[in-house]
Image (spheres, rainbow, N blue to C red):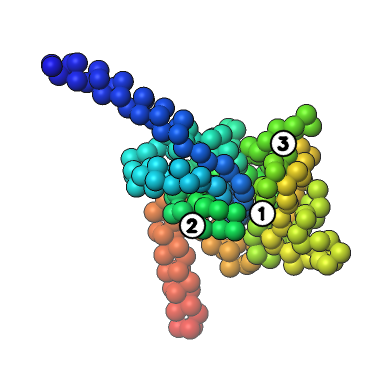
């Protein structure tokens, strides 16, 4: 048996073994929880937890797959099914800092389940405009939704929850559709609300979330110097030292008189 034949045999065996695995294993995604934490730079950190029901005959295979650290997300998608996808995607960019962690099998009232955790970052989840001194208006970009599609557009599927967290201190101006939690009647038009959730079957095609943030004076000063550094580079430090030196000289001359 020469080396070329062995290499060809390996190429045939791996897909065949994966096919056997897929045909014998039985998994069902029973719950999806997507949490979107909005940042002030218009990006978002996304955490997704998928609850997967594992049949008795699939316990051993799942445990083996979980320990196979070389399995890619694409291979896990073949194993689990089409629900194992990122549900927040920027159509004009890619996600980054992606992490995937398949959890151990645990017992639940409905049988054996495993929790699959995905975390990643997405750019341009919001559009931001400055509307006044230290005041910024943010609008959620609903093009990033990658949930189920109905005739009307994106919609949360069965047993799916979407949670959006806005920056602390934000003032919510518009939110459509109204969150399932918290209920508007208990929030005084969402005053001091930063966490909102929508549950299964909620239509997202006309989703709107508009809010404002107020930048502190300290943040404005830091942002100013950061922009100076971006423009002038290390020259900004020379400029600052020159200004400080001029103030010292001016003060010395005034005192000397």
Measuring from the top left, give residue 254's x and y in whole percent. 50, 79
**Which one is earlier in the sequence, the residue at label 3 or at label 1?**
3
Q: Residues within 10 Å of mark 1 (few under 14, many from 20)?
A: some
Marks 3 and 2, how far apart at CA: 32 Å
Secondary structure under tag 1 reads strand
Q: Which residue is mark 3?
A: 154
Q: Is the residue under label 1 in contact with that under label 3 (CB below 8 Å)?
A: no
Other-residue count near label 2 (Cα within 10 Å), few / some / many at <14 / 14–19 / ≥20: few
Which residue position holds label 2? 106
Q: Is residue 10 above or below residue 109?
A: above
State the image quarter where residue 221 is shown: bottom right
Task: For marks 3 and 1, give the CA distance.
Answer: 16 Å
Rendered view: 255 above or below 194: below
Looking at the rendered structure, the secondary structure element under dot 3 is strand
First in sequence: mark 3 vs mark 2: 2
Q: Quadrant of residue 29?
A: top right
Q: Residue at x 76, y 37 (%)?
A: 205
Q: Position of residue 8 (x, y in %)?
A: 25, 18
Q: Which residue position holds label 1?
A: 163
- Asked if one can make out residue 70 in the rendered structure from this viewpoint, the answer is yes
In the image as oriented, which residue stretches furthest toward the left?
A: 2
Counting every numbered tag in the picture gives 3
């Amino acid at each position: 048996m020469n080396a070329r034949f062995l290499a060809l045999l390996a190429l045939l065996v791996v897909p065949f073994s994966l096919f056997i695995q897929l045909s014998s294993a039985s998994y069902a995604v029973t719950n999806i929880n997507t949490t979107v934490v909005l940042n002030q730079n218009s990006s978002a950190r996304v955490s997704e937890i998928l609850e997967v029901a594992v049949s008795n005959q699939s316990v051993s295979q799942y445990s083996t797959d979980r320990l196979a650290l070389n399995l890619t997300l694409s291979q896990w998608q073949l194993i689990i099914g089409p629900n194992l996808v990122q549900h927040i995607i920027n159509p004009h960019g890619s996600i980054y800092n992606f992490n995937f962690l398949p959890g151990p099998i645990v017992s639940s009232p409905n049988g054996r389940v495993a929790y699959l955790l995905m975390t990643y970052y997405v750019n341009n989840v919001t559009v931001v405009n400055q509307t006044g001194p230290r005041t910024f208006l943010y609008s959620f970009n609903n093009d990033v939704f990658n949930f189920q599609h109905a005739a009307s557009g994106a919609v949360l599927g069965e047993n799916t929850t979407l949670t959006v967290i806005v920056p602390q201190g934000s003032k919510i101006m518009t939110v459509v559709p109204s969150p399932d939690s918290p209920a508007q009647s208990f929030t005084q038009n969402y005053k001091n609300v930063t966490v909102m959730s929508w549950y299964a079957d909620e239509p997202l095609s006309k989703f709107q979330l508009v809010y404002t943030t107020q930048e502190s004076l300290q943040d404005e000063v830091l942002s100013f110097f950061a922009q100076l550094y971006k423009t002038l580079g290390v020259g900004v430090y020379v400029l600052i030292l020159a200004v400080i030196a001029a103030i010292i000289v001016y003060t010395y001359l005034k005192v000397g008189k």
